[in-house]
Amino acid sequence: MNDVQLTQAQKARLTNLKSMVVLALADGIIDDAEISSIAAVAARDNISIEEVEKMFMNKDEVVFTVPDDYILKTAYLRDLVVMMVIDGEINERELSICRIVAEKYGFSPDIVDAIAEDVMKSINTIQRIADK
C-alpha cells in the first residue's frame, strides 16, 4: 500500500497491526495464538494477508499513526495487550512496547496493567466455562 494514498484511519489500522507484529517478534518466538490474533485483527480491519506479510518482512515501513477516535485508541491498545498476554508469558520488552504505545495514544502507561488484568480475568473465565 502506498502510504501517501491512505487515509488517517487506514494508517491507524496499519499502525495497530504493525504494533502487534512488533510485539509478536519481541520475545523471539511467534506462536500460533499470536499468529491467529494478528490474522483476526487483520481480517476485522480489512487488511490483506499480503500487507501482514510485508509487515513481518519490513516492520519499519509503516509510519506510526495515532487514531483520532478515543474508542479506537482504546480498542487498539486492548488488541496489543491481548497480544502481549495471549502466549501466557509477559516479558519486559512486550510490556515496554505496550506502555510506549499507551503513552503515544495519550494514556498513562499504567493502563496497560489494568487492561492486562482484565484480559487475563476474561481468558480465565472463558477457560472455566469451556472446561465444564
Image (cartoon, helix red, strand yellow):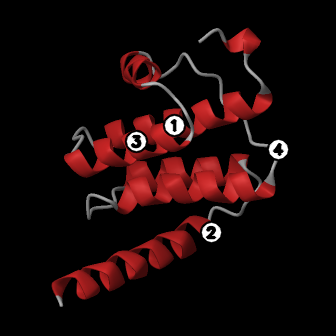
Q: Amino acid at mark 2?
A: Ile
Q: Which residue is rendered at x = 17% and y = 85% of the image?
A: 131
| Residue 79: x %, y % from top left | 51, 54
Q: Which residue is rendered at x = 56% and y = 75% of the image?
A: 114
* Total numbered labels: 4
Q: Which residue is rendered at x = 73% and y = 50% of the image?
A: 105
Residue 24 location, quadrant: top left
2 vs 4, front mark: 4
How far apart marks 1 and 3 lie (CA) works out to 7 Å
Q: Are marks 3 and 2 in contact (CB under 8 Å)?
A: no
Q: Earlier in the sequence, mark 1 or mark 3?
A: 1
Residue marked by disc 4: 68
Q: Are marks 1 and 2 in contact (CB under 8 Å)?
A: no
Q: Is residue 65 above or below residue 78?
A: above
Q: Amino acid at mark 4?
A: Asp
How far apart marks 2 and 4 lie (CA) works out to 19 Å
